């Protein structure tokens, strides 16, 4: 230090600045090491809890009546991971054994604390777990999360409510389907299938009938997936009366009733090519003898995709063989028609998926 006495102040400042930077670097290194050790410790505790509670929750037949050990707070995250995982294959149901374990460890009260004071992940796990418990008393605690701005939280809350009390929850769930454009359609469809058509068909049908042209296609897909019978009259009326091309295309994609093909056939002459294309696909999926002539007529359509889907539709008809396709090809005077049949048959030979 004595060597710094009388030295230029700038050099002294630089020296002490270097000391400070070195000290801060060392401190940061110590903090990182400590934090890493804390994370590793938590991971080890979590892994031990998962292993331990897996043996309790996934009980072998005949061992479900053994004593349930207490659930320490440090094991809660591992317990909840196992709890939620073992319920997923049950598709919204639970078992007497799992219900007994939940009661004996006081799971609900712990989950309520997570809902009120936990972070995002803790709240999400708690909502999912409460849905699996299926206690009607927890309905009002989960209910307000269905309005959460985060689509993941609101979807998990919707599923939990439908598990807890589907009759009560459906009147809250269906309006959210209409309102929430940020919800994953796959997740919504999964919830609807999980709870069953009996619980959701009436509400979903009413919402579909009242929806505007922007929302109706999404609702028709959901309704057709859970109840084709309930969707059929709505699809039929839409095809007969609607001018909205997107809505018409959606109805053509999801319709399943051959009795309604009279609503489809006129659409082969629709002014918009993508409607003609989808009508051809629908006839290929549901068509009956005689419809092949309608498809042959549009093999010369000005749009390549219409010709392509018409040729594919012909090939998809159960009563049209490869030999029939070749005879149809030879009978065409239009070069486009002959070429598109050749193209589709070549794809089939090469194993190209439609």
Image: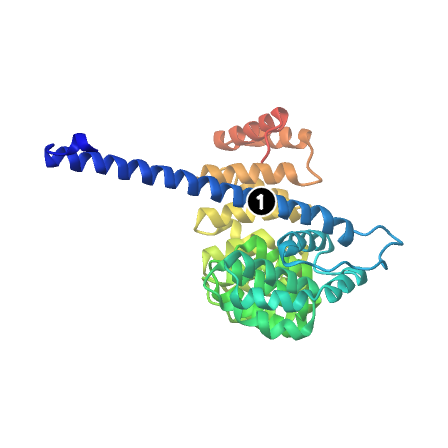
Query: Which residue: 64% across, 72% down?
Result: 138
Residue 82 location (% of width, % of height): 68, 52
Pick whichever, 211 or 16, lies toward us. 16
Name which quarter of the figure residue 201 lies in: bottom right
- Front residue of 248/262: it is 248
Foreground of the two, 342 or 38? 38
Which residue is identified by label 1? 41
Residue drawn at the location 46% of the way across and 56% of the way down:
245
Colour treatment of the image:
rainbow
56 relative to 329 in the view: left or right: right
Q: Is residue 329 above or below residue 129?
A: above
Q: Answer with the quarter of the image where residue 140 lies.
A: bottom right
Q: Quadrant of the N terminus?
A: top left
Q: Residue furthest front?
A: 2
Locate residue 317, reporting x and y percent: 67, 41
Residue at (53, 64) in percent of width and height: 177
- How packed mark 1 is, by other alpha carbons closer than 10 Å (few <14, some 14-19, many 20 or more), is few
Does residue 100 appear in this view? yes
Residue displayed at 63% across by 42% down? 292
Check the image and report above or below for 259 versus 134.
Answer: above
Image spot of residue 20 (x, y percent): 27, 39
Quarter placement of the C terminus: top right
Asked if residue 154 lies left or right of residue 3, the reply is right
**For residue 249, side relative to residue 69 (left or right):** left
Q: Position of residue 311 (x, y in %)?
A: 57, 36
- Comparing 189 with 220, the one in front is 189
Number of marks in picture: 1
Q: Residue furthest right?
A: 62
Whether residue 260 is visible: no
Q: Secondary structure at mark 1?
A: helix
Give the image quarter of residue 28: top left
């Amino acid at each position: 230090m004595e060597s710094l006495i009388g030295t230029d102040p700038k050099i002294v400042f630089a020296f002490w600045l270097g000391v400070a930077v070195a000290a801060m670097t060392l401190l940061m290194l110590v903090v990182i090491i400590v934090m890493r050790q804390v994370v590793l410790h938590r991971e080890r505790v979590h892994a031990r809890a998962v292993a331990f509670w897996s043996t309790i929750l996934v009980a072998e037949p005949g061992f479900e009546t053994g004593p349930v050990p207490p659930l320490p707070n440090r094991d809660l995250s591992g317990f909840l991971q196992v709890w939620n995982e073992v319920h997923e294959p049950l598709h919204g149901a639970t078992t007497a054994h799992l219900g007994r374990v939940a009661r004996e460890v006081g799971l609900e009260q712990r989950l309520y604390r997570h809902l009120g004071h936990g972070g995002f992940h803790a709240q999400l796990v708690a909502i999912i777990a409460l849905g699996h418990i299926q206690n009607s008393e927890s309905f009002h605690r989960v209910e307000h999360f269905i309005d959460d701005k985060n689509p993941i939280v609101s979807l998990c809350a919707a599923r939990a409510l439908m598990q807890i009390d589907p009759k009560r929850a459906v009147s809250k769930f269906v309006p959210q389907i209409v309102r929430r454009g940020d919800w994953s359609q796959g997740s919504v469809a999964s919830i609807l299938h999980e709870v069953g058509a009996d619980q959701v068909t009436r509400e979903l049908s009413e919402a579909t009938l009242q929806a505007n042209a922007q929302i109706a296609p999404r609702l028709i897909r959901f309704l057709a997936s859970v109840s084709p019978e309930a969707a059929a009259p709505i699809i039929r009326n839409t095809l007969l009366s609607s001018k909205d091309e997107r809505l018409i295309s959606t109805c053509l994609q999801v319709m399943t009733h051959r009795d309604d093909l009279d609503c489809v056939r006129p659409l082969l002459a629709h002014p918009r090519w993508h409607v003609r294309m989808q009508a051809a696909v629908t006839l290929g999926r549901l068509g009956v003898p005689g419809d092949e002539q309608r498809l042959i007529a549009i093999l010369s359509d000005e749009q390549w995709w219409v010709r392509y889907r018409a040729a594919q539709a012909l090939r998809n008809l159960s009563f049209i063989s490869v030999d029939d396709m070749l005879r149809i090809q030879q009978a065409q005077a239009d070069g486009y028609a002959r070429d598109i049949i050749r193209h589709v048959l070549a794809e089939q030979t090469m194993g190209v998926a439609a």
